[in-house]
Every structure is written in structure tokens, then in C-alpha cells.
Amino acid sequence: MTETPNHPTRPPAVERVSGREVHRNPWMTITEDVVRRGDGSLGTYGVVHRTPGVVVIAIRQDGRFAVVRQFRYPVGSRRWEFPAGTVDHPDEDITHAARRELAEETGMVADTVTVLATLDVAPGFTAQQTSIVVAEQLQAGSPSRDDTEQDMTVGWWSRDEITAAITDGTIVDAQSLAGWAVFVANGR
């Protein structure tokens, strides 16, 4: 198998000529970059910039997995997915972010967290990466959800229920699907 770099790379044939910020809010920044290709032609890229993300595969002592259901405005529907979020500030460690997101969304506190992989979220339009983290040795606590998570519910599903939910289209969140694939590929 050929090695793939773990860091962002730009082919020398694509040079950034200029760029400007076209939108900013608390969750993202969007830039528009003008580039020059190797043949001299110009092009434009819109890039969504977000802080690193985390998807948490939390396993209770009885072998059941935490899933959350919440309203997702862009798709206009409630979705089942694994607990997830982004780092709160540039210095926040991804394992800290995973523990924080799990506690905020489910109330569970993890004694053990393990990073399995870091993935590109959607490299066609965003530079964001997300880490797939397994959380184990859980202790119950109280959720501390933000305003966008007020309607969130928590379920504890078996491995077979997760597989069925993926197969029947109940779980369609791409990051959750990628997280489960990484989890299974790691022999978990």
C-alpha cells in the first residue's frame, strides 16, 4: 500500500494568487481563493474553514453505543448520529474535545479515550479534519447541551442495531458512517 501524507499538501502546479474572506460566523469562515494552475489558467476555489472536529464512538460497559438524535437545520430533519463536535479553541487537545462533547451531549464522562484516525471531512470544499475517537469506561453525569442541541435525545444501541440503522438509512450522517467504518476496520 502506498503511503498517504497526513498533512495538507498542494501540488506545485496550483498557486494561490489571492484570496478574500467572504463570510464569517461563530462556526466557520468561508474564503474565496483565486489560483493559477500549471498551464497558466486561473480558477476560483471557495473553501469552508472550521476548527478540527471529533466523532465519539462511546461504548458503555454493557457493550451498547451512544447515539444522539437532533434537528439538523441544513437538511431540515432530525438525524441519528454519534456524539460529535469541534474543538472550542486552537489549544484544545482532540481527546479533551471528545470528552467534552460526550459529556455535553450525553452526560457521560469517559475515563479512557483513544484516537483511531483523523479524516478529511469533505476535501472538495473544506479544509476541516475530524478525529474518530473511542470513549470507554463511562460514568453517568448530566448533559450540558448548547442552544442548538435543546431537542437532542440519547439512545444506547447494540452493534446489531447500529448496523441495521446504517443499512436501512436511519443513520446517514457521513461522519458517523466514517467513524463506524474506522471503528470496525480497527477490529473493534
Image: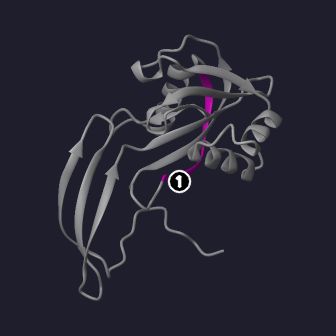
Q: Quadrant of the rendered structure where residue 154 is?
A: top right
Q: Secondary structure at mark 1?
A: strand
In the depicted structure, whether residue 15 falls above or below residue 108: below
Instruction: Give the farthest residue toward the top.
Output: 142
Task: State the residue in front, 173 or 64.
Answer: 173
Q: Quadrant of the rendered structure where residue 26 is?
A: top left
Q: Give the residue type that dot 1 points to.
A: Leu
Residue at 47% across, 55% down = 122
According to the picture, the residue beneath numbered tag 1 turns out to be: 119
In the depicted structure, whether residue 161 falls above or below residue 28: above
Q: Does 9 appear in magenta?
A: no
In the depicted structure, whether residue 113 falls above or below residue 6: above
Q: Looking at the rendering, in which quadrant would you find the C terminus?
A: top right
Residue at 51% across, 39% down = 54
Q: Is residue 66 left or right of residue 105?
A: right
Say few, some or many: other residues with alpha carbon within 10 Å of mark 1 (under 14 / 14 to 19 / 20 or more): many
Q: Does 116 appear in magenta?
A: yes
Q: Looking at the rendering, in which quadrant would you find the N terminus?
A: bottom right
In the depicted structure, whether residue 50 falls above or below residue 67: below
- Image coordinates of residue 63 in percent, x first then y, are 79, 28
Residue at 68% across, 44% down = 180
- Image coordinates of residue 12 in percent, x first then y, are 32, 80
Instruction: Give the farthest residue toward the bottom.
Output: 39
Instruction: Give the farthest residue toward the front.
Output: 76
- Image coordinates of residue 86 in percent, x first then y, are 43, 37
Residue at 70% across, 42% down = 169
| Secondary structure, magenta segment, majority class | strand
Q: Is residue 123 left or right of residue 168?
A: left
Segment colored magenta: 109-121
